[in-house]
Image: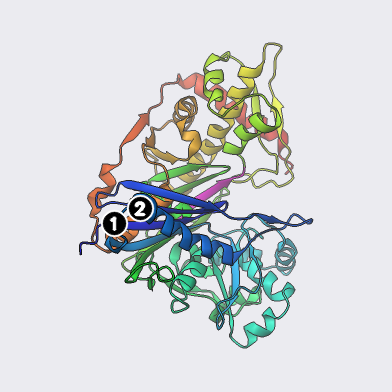
Amino acid sequence: MEKKYVLSVDQSTQGTKALLFDKQGTLICRTDLPHEQIINEEGWVSHNLNEIYANTVQVVKNVVMQAGIDKNQIACLGISNQRETSAAWNRTTGEPVADAIVWQCSRAKEICAEIERAGYAQEVRRATGINLSPYFPASKFAWFLQETDGVREMAERGEVAFGTIDTWLVYKLTGGKSYKTDYSNASRTQLFNLNTLTWDDKICGIFGINSKSLAEVCDSNANFGETDFEGFLDEPIPIHGVLGDSHGSLFGQGCLKKGMMKSTYGTGSSIMMNVGESPVYSEHGVVTSLAWGMNGKVTYVLEGNINYTGAVISWLQKDLKLVASAKETEELANAANPADTTYLVPAFTGLGAPYWDSEAKAVISGITRTTGQAELAKAALECIAYQITDIVEVMSRDSGVAIEELRVDGGPTRNRYLMQFQSDMAQIPVQVPNAEELSGIGAAYVAGLAMKIYDPSIFDRMQRTKFTPSMDKEVREKKYCGWKEAVSMVLTH
C-alpha cells in the first residue's frame, strides 16, 4: 500500500496539535487538545507529563478519524515541541518523578544565583552560547535533583532520565526503546557545548548533573525510533524528524541559507537568524544556538526572544477594554493621526533581548491632547515592530551579514498595518506565508524529506504576501529615534 501522508505533532505550551499533510506538503487536517496549566500559590508553572503523552496519542487518532484517511497510508511522524520545558522520569518504569517544569517558570532562580556567585556565569555562556538563566533546563534539572524526593538517589543508581518534551514523547511513543533528542533541543538546555557538539561534562558538573542521565543527541532528521501510537496503527511508523518549535518554524519558512531570518509573532516573539556552519557569538544581547543537525552537519543560529508582542494586543483588549478584538487594531491604526508621537514600551515584566532589563517598567510617552483610542492602538502595534527591528539590527551587526528579508508567522501577521510598519522600520521586505502552523510544517518537512516523500522544491510551493518599505527615510529615522528615547526612559542600567 502506498504511504502518502506525513504526520506531525506540535506539542506546545498550551496544547498539542496533530497535523496531517499530503504528498504535496499541503495541510489537509488538524486537531488540537489543550492540557492543564498547573500554577501553584508561588507562581510555579507545571505540566502533567502523562496528560501530554495521552493527548499526543489522542490527537493523532482524532486527526486520522477527522480526515477520513486510511491510517495505514501514513508514512512517518515529525515532532516539534515547546523547547525549554523540562521533564524527569524513571527510566525503568517510564513514570514521571514529578510534573514537568514549564519554560516560563523561574523556580530555579536561586540555583542560577548560586552558580553566578561561584563565578561560573561566563564559562556557561562561552560553552553553551546562552546566558545563565532559570529559563533553561539546566537549572530546572538541578532543581529536580535538589528538591524532589528520591530523584538524587535515583540518579545515583542511573535510573533517572532528564529531557525536554521531545525526549519524553520519543521515549513514550517508542515504548521506552529510544532515549534521544535532537541538536536544536539539546542546544537550548544550557548543558550542550556548541563547539564540541557534545554534552559538556564540566558544565553538567556545575549544575550537579551526570551527563549519563541525558539523552543521546541525534541529527534532527535521524530515525528516532518507531511508534504505533499504543496499537492504533496496524504497523509502526518511523519518527523521522524532531525540532524545537522555533527551529521548526525556521525550517518550515525555508530559511536554509546563511543570513535568512524569521520572526514568530505569538504571545511574545522569537526572532531567529541562520548564521551558517560556524557559531557567531553576540556582543549585543542575543544568544547563539543550533538551528538543527542534518545529515551529519549542524547549522547555527542567533536568536532573540521578546516577552510582549502579541500579548500587547491582548492587554488592549482584555485589560484596558480599548478594543473588542485584535482585528479592530488595524482599523484604528489606519484611522489614527499619523503625526501622533505616542510610544508604548511594553516592559510589563521587564525587557527581553537585546536589553535584558528585568527591572524595567512599562511606559506610555509622547501623549498629546489629541491622543485618543486610535493613537493608543497604533502605538501598541508599532511597539511590536520596533522591538523586532531592534533584534534585526543587532543580528545584522553581530553576524556581519546584510539581511535581505524577514519571513514572519503567527496570528498578528494578519494585521496589514503592522506588517507594513514592520517592513518600514526594519527597512527590508517582510514575507507573510499563506500557511499557518509553521512549527508543525517544519517538523513534517524534515520527516517527509528524510523519507523522500518530499524533495527540496517543497519550499517553493508556499505562497507569500510581500510587504516592502515605503516610508520616507527621514520620517522612519525620526520615528525609530523616538522609540530609542522611549526605551531609554525605562532602562534601569
Q: Is residue 317 or residue 84 the one in the foreground?
A: 317
Of all residues, the one furthest to the top in this rendering is 370
Asked if the residue under mark 2 is in contact with the one under mark 1, i.e. CB atoms within 8 Å, the reply is yes
Residue 253 placed where, x, y %?
Answer: 37, 46
Q: Is residue 177 or residue 231 the one in the foreground?
A: 231
Q: Sequence-wise, which precedes: disc 1 or disc 2?
A: 1
The stretch drawn in magenta includes residue 138: no
On screen, residue 382 versus residue 243, left or right, reads right
Q: Amino acid at mark 2?
A: Leu
Residue 5's tag is 1
Q: Is residue 193 at all visible to an observer of this figure?
A: no
Residue 385 placed where, x, y %?
Answer: 53, 33
Residue 66's tag is none
- Vertical position of residue 450 compared to residue 69: above or below: below
Name the residue at 30% across, 37% down: 463
Q: Is residue 446 or residue 342 the one in the foreground?
A: 446
Q: Is residue 446 at all visible to an observer of this figure?
A: yes
Q: Quadrant of the C terminus?
A: top right
- Helix, strand or loop at label 1? It is strand
Q: Quadrant of residue 189?
A: bottom right
Q: Which residues are magenta?
A: 300-307
Q: Quadrant of the N terminus?
A: bottom left
Name the residue at 53% across, 58% down: 83
Name the residue at 78% across, 56% down: 42
Q: Which residue is mark 2?
A: 20
